[in-house]
Image (spheres, rainbow, N blue to C red):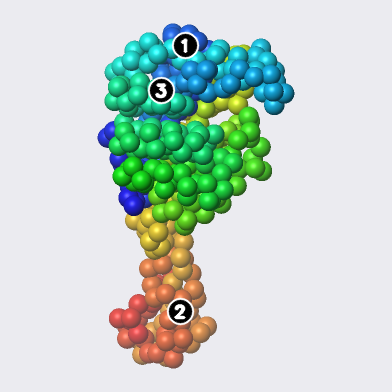
Amino acid sequence: MPQKVQIANRMIGEGEPCFVIAEAGSNHDGKLKQAKQLIDIAVDSGADAVKFQTFRADKIAAITKDKIVNIDIAGSKTLYELYKKVELPWEWHSELADYARNKGIIFLSTPFDEGAVDELDKLDVPAFKVASFELVHLPLLRYIAGKEKPIILSTAMASLGEIEEAIEAILKENNDRIILLHCAVGYPLKVENVNLAVLDTLKQAFSYPVGYSDHTLSLAVPIAAVTRGAKVIEKHFTISRSFSGPDHPFALEPEELKAMIRGIREAEKAIGSPRKGILNSELIHYQRGRRSIFATVNIAKGTIITEKMVGILRPAIGLEPKYLHLVIGRKAQVNISANEPITWDKI
C-alpha cells in the first residue's frame, strides 16, 4: 500500500505539505456567479483544491413521508426537497472546472451516484472524494475505484470494520491509492466530539495517508490535526454565514479560511525536524546565555586554583560548568586576570 498518493501535481503523505481542500459544497445556492466567487475565495485563501458536490436529488433520497426525513432546513421539509434545492447543475461543472484550473487551483467534487462519477471523470478530475455517508455504499465505492484515480475517503460514523470493508472493496478494483479522512458529523460539530486521537488509530490500523475533514467552527482544530499528522484538511467555507443555505452556518468565512490555512502553514514550519540540538539561530543566545568558568580574582602563574578564585558566569566563552571539579586544584600555567574565562590552555 502506498505511503504517498499523488493528486494532480501534489504528493500527499509523510514529509509532504498538508493538502488543503476548501469545501464549497452546496454554498453556491444555485447561482453560477456565486460558485465562481467561492472558487476565487479558495484561491485567495491559499487552498490547494476547491471542492463541490455532484448529485441529483432523485439519486440520493427517496420521496417518502417517513418521519425520519421530516426536517426543517433552509425552508425544506424533506431530504428530497433539500437536495433538489442545492443541486449543482450538470452544465455548470465544465465551466467551473475550467474556471478553477485557469485560476491555478485543483477542482474536485464529491459524487453521490454512478452518473455523477462518470460526469466528473469526463472532466478529468484528478481524484474522487467520498463522503462519510457513502462509505458503506460498497457498489458506489467499487464503481469509483474502477476509474483508477485516487480516492479520499471520509470515515465519520464508521467502525474500523466498516472502514476495512470499504478499503477491501476499493482494493478489489486494483486501486490502492487511498487517503483516509477522520471525520465526525455535527453541523457544527462540538470540539469535544472531534477526537483527533483517531488519526493515530487510522495510521496504525491501515497505513494509508490520513487527514481530517472538519465540521467545527474552530480554526484551532484543523491546525491541531496537522500537528497530529493530518496530511489532508477539508474545511467548509462560505461567502457569509448569514446566507440561508444548509451548509452556511457551520462554514468559515473568507478571512477565517485564510487565517486557518496560514495557521496550518505556520504549524508545519513549527513541526520541523525531530533532531534535537543547537540550532544555528540559537548560537548567539547559547554563547550569551549559558555559563562558563571565570576567574573572579587575579590568579598568578603557578598558583593552585581554589574554589574561591573562580565563578560560573555568563557568557559561555570558557570551560563548561561541568568541568569545575577538574579546574579546582590545578595550577595556573599563565597569569589569569579577574573576569577572564578559564580555558584548558591556562591551567
- Gap between marks 3 and 1 measured at Cα: 21 Å
Dot in front, 3 or 1: 3
The residues bearing labels 3 and 2 have C-alpha atoms spaced at a distance of: 70 Å
Q: Quadrant of residue 117?
A: top left
Tell me if label 3 and label 2 are in contact, CB under 8 Å: no
Q: Rate crowding at label 3 as few (under 14), some (14 to 19) or many (20 or more) other CA atoms within 10 Å.
A: many
Q: Amino acid at mark 2?
A: Lys
Instruction: Find disc 1 in the rendering and name its residue.
Output: 34
Residue at 61 percent of width and 17 percent of height: 63
Q: Secondary structure at mark 2?
A: helix
* Mark with earlier residue (1, 2): 1
The residue located at (46%, 61%) in the rendering is 289
Assign a secondary structure to mark 1.
helix
Give the camera-side residue of 10 and 347: 10
Instruction: Evaluate if marks 1 and 2 touch, with contact meaning CB atoms under 8 Å apart.
Output: no
Observer-nearest of 72 and 119? 119
Quarter residue 37 falls in: top left
Please provide percent x and percent y for residue 161: 53, 51
**Residue type at numbered disc 1:** Gln
Up the image or down, 337 lies above or below 256; here it is below
Q: Position of residue 3 (x, y in %)?
A: 34, 51
Residue 171 picture location, percent across and down = 36, 46
Instruction: Name the residue located 38 percent from the left edge and 72 percent from the top edge.
Output: 318
Residue ID for mark 2: 322
Q: Specify the farthest residue to the right.
A: 67
Q: Which label sits in the foreground, 3 or 2? A: 3
The residue where tag 3 is placed is: 116
Question: Of callouts 3 and 1, which one flags the residue occurring earlier in the amino acid sequence?
Answer: 1
Q: Is residue 20 left or right of residue 157?
A: left
Query: Viewer-nearest of labels 1 and 2?
Result: 1
Which amino acid type corresponds to the residue marked 3 in the rendered image?
Answer: Ala
Q: Earlier in the sequence, mark 3 or mark 2?
A: 3
